Amino acid sequence: MIDDSLVQPGDAVHPGKPVIVDRYGPGARINHWITATSLILLALSGLALFHPSLFFLTALFGGGQVTRTIHPWIGVVLFISFFVFFFQLWRANLWVRNDFVWLSRFTDIIKQNEDRLPELGKYNAGQKFIFWSMTGLILVLIVSGIGIWDQYFGEATAIETKRYAMLVHAIAAVLIICVFILHVYAGIWTRGTLRAMTRGSVTGGWAWRHHRKWLRALASQRKAGPAE
Amino acid sequence: MMDSPRTAISNPPVQPMESNLTERDLVRRSATSSLPPPERQLTPVAKLIDVSKCIGCKACQSACVEWNDTDPAVGENVGYYTNPNDLTPDMFTLMRFTEWVNPETDNLEWLIRKDGCMHCADPGCLKACPAPGAIVQYSNGIVDFVHENCIGCGYCVKGCPFNIPRISKVDHKAYKCTLCSDRVAVGQGPACAKACPTKAIVFGTKEDMKKHAEERITDLKSRGYKNAGLYDPPGVNGTHVMYVLHHNDKPHIYADLPDNPHISRVVETWKGVTKYVGLAFMGLAAAGSVLHGVIGKPNRVSEEDEEHAEKLVERNGRGAG
Amino acid sequence: MTNSWTDIKNTDLVVVMGGNAAEAHPCGFKWVTEAKANRGARLIVVDPRYTRTASVSDFYAPIRQGTDIAFLSGVIKYCIDNDKVQWEYTKNFTNAAYILKEGFAFKDGLFTGYDEAKRDYDKASWDYETGDDGFAVVDMSLQHPRCVWNMLKQHVAIYTPEFVERVCGTPKDKFLKICSMIAECSSPTKTMTSMYALGWTQHSSGSQNIRTMAMLQLILGNIGVRGGGMNALRGHSNIQGLTDVGLMSNLIPGYMNIATDKEPDFKTYMTTRQFKPLRPGQTSYWQNYGKFFVSFQKAMWGDTARKENDWAYDYLPKLDVPAYDVLRMFEMMNAGQVNGYFCQGFNPILSFPNRGKITSALSKLKFLVTMDPLETETSRFWENHGEYNQVDPKSIQTEVFQLPTTCFAEEEGALVNSGRWLQWHWPGGSPPGEAKHDTWIMGQIFTRMRELYRKEGGAFPDPILNLSWDYKEPEEPDPEELARELNGRALTDLTDPTDATKIVVPAGKQVLNFSQLRDDGTTMCACWVYSGCFNEAGNNMARRDNNDPGDTGAYLNWTFAWPLNRRTLYNRASCDLNGKPWDPSRKIIEWDGAKWSGFDVPDIAPNAKPQDVGPFIMNQEGASRLFTRGLMRDGPFPVHYEPFETPVANPLNPKIRGNPTTRVFQSDVAQLGTSDEFPYAATSYRLTEHFHFWTKHNRVNAALQPEFFVEISEELAKEKGVAPGGWVRVWSKRGSVKAKAVVTKRIRPLICDGKPVHVVGIPLHWGFVGATKKGWGPNSLSPFLGDANTDTPEFKAFLVNIESTSAPGAVA
């Protein structure tokens, strides 16, 4: 059974040596990098205010006052850019039974026994985890962030609420940074991934190795689709 | 000169003076772990506000505005005497008026409390502050905001158990009562205490103020206020602004003065365990990744993978052609 | 004040009634907190509102405004009934033992001699029996049925606790609790002080409010003693000085009277000013009246005032009416009888009653001159400020000259405080812009006008042309020059009356004090009570020695107190008949067998034997007066009369409206409201955040109390659907205002005559200029009439109605 969600608008294969598979269009890539930049800036500015030993990071932004001012605005940018992403990708990130199978073979993932793993669609369970935890954490961060964005919403919440918001924001930030690290590392460890977000495409081998089901779907779509 | 003034009613010096409160007198400094211990211990000072003597004339508010050269807005009347209606970045102290019917006597009591920074021995604002040196505590007990270091994040607002600091919408810095640190530094008591016509606000060493409070409590007990007492809450290790209350058994009747103030557990968690565990967590994640990157084998796409893909695409392409 | 602010620390009981010391006099109130903290003194507050003074009181009781006489007469009755009287004091130092003439009586709320048409009394029967020796007859046993004491007892008999509760709305148990606290002070070693202000004076029976408390203080033996007295808290920093120097149409400086047109010459004027003692051997100090008067005339007209021309007596204006008080002036102005008005340091359209009438009156002037350091509403009365000042500028032809003056902080001179201290002060800053000292302005106007009179003559230019004006700079007299005039000086060498060879004061030198003034034209003195303030020892008002031997609160070397630097008036009364202090721990002065001495300047001749000379030397009796003979217009004993606008009928005689001797102009009668139309009892007052209409110009004060409001009870708010902080309209027969509503537990409905009386409190600090939000004042609503004796407007008790409304419209 081929799930429609395996293939997304813009995904395509181009025969050749190697085969080139379009994974992300230019819009998505720009958006990704906006999100990524925002997240990095948010992490840096947030960390500066999170622990005294990191306060020096405020210098990157032109001082404490500026850091305090722009952090929430970057948050808004992140929120918007991420959720543009979200609406593009959420269907592809829905959980399917194979994801459990894939996850249950964690050691094979690490040991790169690809053959022992089930064939996957566009995203594996790890990517989905990243996607959904980002989604959840960004929601938590934006809500708690607005609760403590005193410059504009100072009167909107009680101080006790703000205290909880502060704590929740800090914890969520820690978690999202960890997720972010995981995301970045996975992108680097899994060689050939990065080009999906730079050039927008991956090689057919990469798709075969990691998202075979997706590749098959794309290939068959090609067969079923109109002649070029 | 004495290290700390003993009263607020002395006249100002006529010769310029060196400030007696310097960086060397700091016992705490926000977001600073390596503060050298002070070379001397100043005598702890305190302001004692005798609520039973206060007539709510707002001379203290006026003096505070004058001395600190703030410019409070002309607001509106919203149905009571408390004006402005709350502390503001331009009003560091505020008379709060509460009409309370004493259930024991059925008599009305008009409780008038001068609200403002309590100068906690364990200051929640300082604990919460992320900006190094924006909040400092002197060895005489004064907790002061250093505005050039303030980033306006409002963490002090969350840290304060008394809801005191206010962030200016103009310069985005936190403001509150300084206990007139700039006056105390030159041997003068706070402006509010100097202006108070009934000596409801007095100033001196904390020890003297406690003794004075005892006398006042004895007087109040003789007038039937059997629960009269000193408000010097232990939850924040005591304060350098204290109240004599006629009903010390229920501070909350005085415009929600906390019965047992302490730094919020949420704030403690946020500024305590979260800070350390969080940092550790992120550090471990980063370090783990790096380590795995170094010692682990990267997941590379093999030639076979590419060939498989080519074949697959070819197969399907043919089908189509 | 009979005593001083600092003396209040010596008291055992403070009664604040008819005032709100903590709010209106916060700095002076410190002495109450000192007494409480250091002596364990108790504080009682009786007020329609639970005030900020009440917030630090030991006992508070509510009272309906305008019923203080009933309350205090009830306390007097309680003290008499319960034998709580300082008997030795009462018998010897008051006129309790004096026997009244046959024919004097009180019936149906009126004394004998009432003439309804004139609204006045023939006071002939209000006097003592006189013996063959020409002295008043007394019965020291107080047994005579017509002695003052028994007449008083009879007079206060109706003021039972039940009556007080019915009239005043004060719950009986609270009233009795206060009675018992006050009664304790009949002990010679316990004293009570009375602190009052405009809460007593601004009533149609204002003077009698004060008298009733004075009588109570006398029978408790609390006058002349430390921590006692009748202490009027003056509302302006120098209003005491205003009365001292006689800035009223019927006074000349030092509480002497302007002549009336029935006194065409000096001789006639002096016949009613002989002040013969009414008891043998008594000192009647006003017998020196002639010395003070002649010295005053010499100060005014110098060499022109001579024996031959009756000391220029003709130069003084003669009154054709009892007084040209502000109400009469504005009545006349409104009738088109006044051309020009100099308004110096006053803001009539906010401070005089019935603002509509005041605006109408000012509109009929040809010119108005205002002299004030601040913008006043009066100087802009012709400007349309929308609802806040709804006038048509085109229809007003009054030419307004606005002269900016300096304020106290830019001036040198003395301010006289409530305790009669003349405190010299120095300028702390330079005047801004074109502001000039009032003395400069007056000097300029005077010298120019004199020049016009010199050139053009006039009906009677002599008083102007001959006015003594020998200042170094005639265009701007110097404060010290003026102060030296107030003190007085010798015009020729003054010799010792017993030894003509001995010169006491050389010509041209300042007199030591008023004891050196003469009635032969050899001395001048502009205000005899101030004499001693600036003598050859220098400017005594500038002294700043705060040593206080004996810790009595006298501070004799701090500035100068009139008279003679005396801090407690009648202080001889602090000692018994042998001249020993009633309370040795609170000695002021003492008789040592030969003379009086102590911590204060004795208020008696130093060698006057205690058994012989009574302590109240300003009275012909040498004693104080529980019965005032003909000195009060509305009766020798106080009577409770309802305010002119009242929710309750006169309990003694329902036909009497208000005080029967209050002057009421015909044009105002129709503007008096009744309780059917205006059911709520309004009162007015100041707030501690503001000083009259000054501080609304200051942004700090404006922030502390930004907006006009009225205060009502939760019950009335509920009845009228008024939300806290919502807008209400309050109106009377004379005007309407809009205000924010402060709904409070501090005002509660009073049950009077069986029905609830709702009180509406209206503070007075807002107008249409300044830094605060625009607003109104109570004078838009209050009636144009006042006290029977002083014509002080009845600001404290009038009727209004109230309803919920919307915010005032946009300002034009």
Image (cartoon, coloured by chain):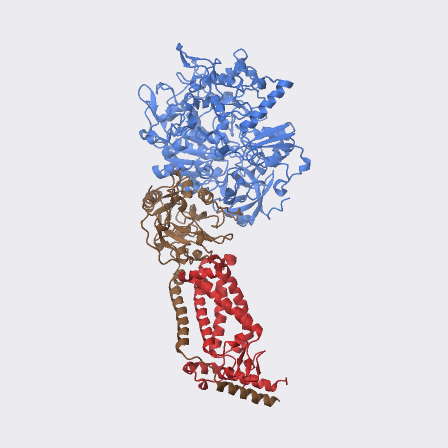
Q: Does residue C781 appear to the left or right of B191 in the view shown?
A: right
Please provide percent x and percent y for residue A131: 49, 74
Location of the C terminus of chain B (image quadrant): bottom right
Tell which of C70 and C545 is nearer to you. C545
Q: Is residue C3 visible?
A: yes
Q: Nearer the viewer, residue C525 or C50?
A: C525
Colour for chain C in the figure: blue
Q: Count of labels shown? A: 0
Q: Examine the image and state in which quarter residue C775 appears.
A: top right
**What residue do we see at 38% from left, 62% from top?**
B272
The image shows residue A19, relative to residue A143, as above or below, that is below
Instruction: Give the image location of residue C402, x and y in percent.
Output: 60, 33
Question: Which tint is chain B?
Answer: brown
- Going by the picture, which residue comes out furthest to the front? A17
Q: Position of residue A160 (x, y in %)?
A: 44, 59
Which quadrant of the figure has residue C337?
Answer: top right
Q: Colour of chain A?
A: red
Please report the residue visible at 40 percent of the width from the left and 9 percent of the height from the top: C501
Q: Is residue C598 above or below residue B291?
A: above
Q: Position of residue A151 (x, y in %)?
A: 51, 57
- State whether residue B180 appears in this view: no
Indicate the quadrant containing the N terminus of chain B: top left, top right, bottom left or bottom right. top left
